[in-house]
Image: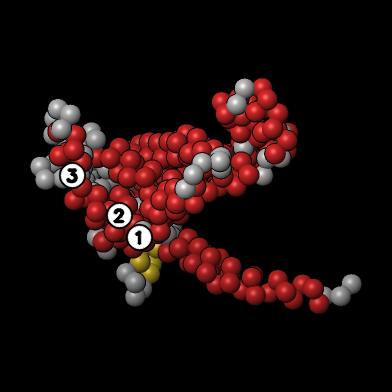
């Protein structure tokens, strides 16, 4: 058998090895060392033991799970009816599609800086708008009980455009005969309930899985808005790792990164297998 076709795999394998495999193996190695960037000393699993005993880890793990569940759940729930609307025969469809996708194009740092201003308790536009309806001043980012939920709200706003695009693709792949039959049976609600909802579930699974993984690894928006504060109230796993890196514990932060990788894999892989099995059964 000729080896010629397999040579076309080589560029992809080189890129995968250079930018994923080698850094991952190096991170695993340095997680077993006391690392000063210039020299390293092998200390076994001590970094893992120290990381798991971090007093902030329990709160950060709780925040990470809440953040991932909220963002993935609400993105799917909100995006599905919006995607159904934007694939129907409405006027200015192209304009509305551009509007909902616009936040995806804005950099996360810019979104964080903008919402930091909008969520200011005294001068922020959000509180000023709510005060017109008699709503008292809300400490969106300054209240320890509310901060992580406020950041999740911004994440949903920023990331929902991707969810809508994926769900629109799923809805548009449904044969038009189903919509014609639903139109005869009762109109838009029947089409949504009995055609779009069941037949776009593969796209919904994709949105849930991607949003969940993104939420579990989320860092930049949380750091831009709260830097894990007030206090440690909105710390997540990735911000705990960064704080250890800033403190000069490079080996310890490498161990944290490896544990986050394993944590995301343990959650995402079985979920992906479960969704894949449901897709096959469909």
Q: Position of residue 190 (x, y in %)?
A: 60, 25
Answer yes or no: is residue 265 visible.
Answer: no
Disc 2: which residue: 111
Question: Is 72 or 170 nearer to us in this picture?
Answer: 170
Farthest-out residue, right: 1
Instruction: From the viewer's perspective, tell me whether residue 106 is left or right of residue 146.
Output: right
**Residue 125, which numbered label?**
3
Q: Are marks 2 and 1 in contact (CB under 8 Å)?
A: yes
Q: Nearer the viewer, residue 118 or 240?
A: 118
Tell me the crowding category of disc 1: few under 14, some 14 to 19, or many 20 or more residues within 10 angstroms, Cα based: few
Q: Count up the numbered dots.
A: 3
Q: Quadrant of the C terminus?
A: top right
Residue 236, located in which quarter of the rendered image? top left
What kind of element bears circle 2? helix
Tag of residue 266: none
Is 89 left or right of 224, judged from the image as shown? Answer: right
Quarter of the rendering containing residue 220: bottom left
Which of the two labelled residues, at mark 2 and mark 3, occupies the earlier sequence position?
A: 2
Q: Nearer the viewer, mark 1 or mark 3?
A: 3
Q: Residue at x 33, y 40 (%)?
A: 153
Counting other residues with Cα less than 10 Å from the Cα at mark 3, is it few (<14), some (14-19), or many (20 or more)? Answer: some
- Residue 206: x and y in percent read 57, 44
As drawn, the residue found furthest toward the left would be: 122
Identify the residue under disc 1: 107
Residue 107, percent from left and from top: 35, 60
Work out how far the residue at label 1 is from the one at label 3, CA to CA, in angstroms.
21 Å
Question: Could you say which is closer to the camera, residue 32 or residue 113?
Answer: 113
């Amino acid at each position: 058998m000729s080896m010629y076709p397999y040579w076309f795999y080589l560029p992809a394998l080189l890129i995968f090895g250079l930018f994923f495999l080698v850094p991952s193996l190096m991170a695993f190695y340095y997680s077993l060392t006391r690392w000063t960037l210039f020299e390293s000393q092998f200390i076994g699993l001590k970094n893992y033991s120290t990381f798991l005993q971090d007093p902030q880890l329990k709160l950060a793990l709780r925040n990470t799970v809440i953040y991932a569940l909220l963002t993935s759940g609400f993105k799917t729930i909100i995006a599905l009816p919006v995607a159904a609307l934007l694939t129907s025969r409405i006027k200015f469809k192209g304009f509305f599609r551009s509007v909902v996708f616009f936040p995806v194009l804005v950099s996360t740092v810019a979104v964080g800086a903008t919402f930091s201003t909008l969520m200011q308790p005294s001068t922020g536009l959000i509180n000023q708008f709510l005060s017109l309806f008699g709503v008292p001043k809300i400490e969106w980012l300054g209240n320890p009980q509310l901060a992580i939920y406020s950041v999740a709200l911004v994440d949903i706003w920023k990331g929902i455009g991707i969810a809508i695009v994926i769900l629109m693709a799923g809805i548009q792949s449904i044969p038009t005969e189903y919509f014609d039959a639903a139109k005869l049976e009762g109109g838009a609600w029947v089409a949504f309930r009995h055609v779009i909802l069941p037949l776009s579930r593969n796209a919904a699974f994709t949105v849930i899985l991607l949003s969940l993984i993104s939420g579990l690894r989320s860092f930049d928006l949380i750091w831009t808005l709260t830097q894990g504060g007030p206090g440690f109230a909105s710390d997540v796993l990735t911000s705990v790792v960064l704080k250890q890196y800033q403190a000069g514990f490079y080996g310890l932060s490498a161990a944290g990164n490896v544990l986050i990788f394993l944590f995301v894999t343990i959650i995402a892989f079985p979920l992906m297998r479960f969704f894949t099995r449901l897709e096959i059964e469909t």
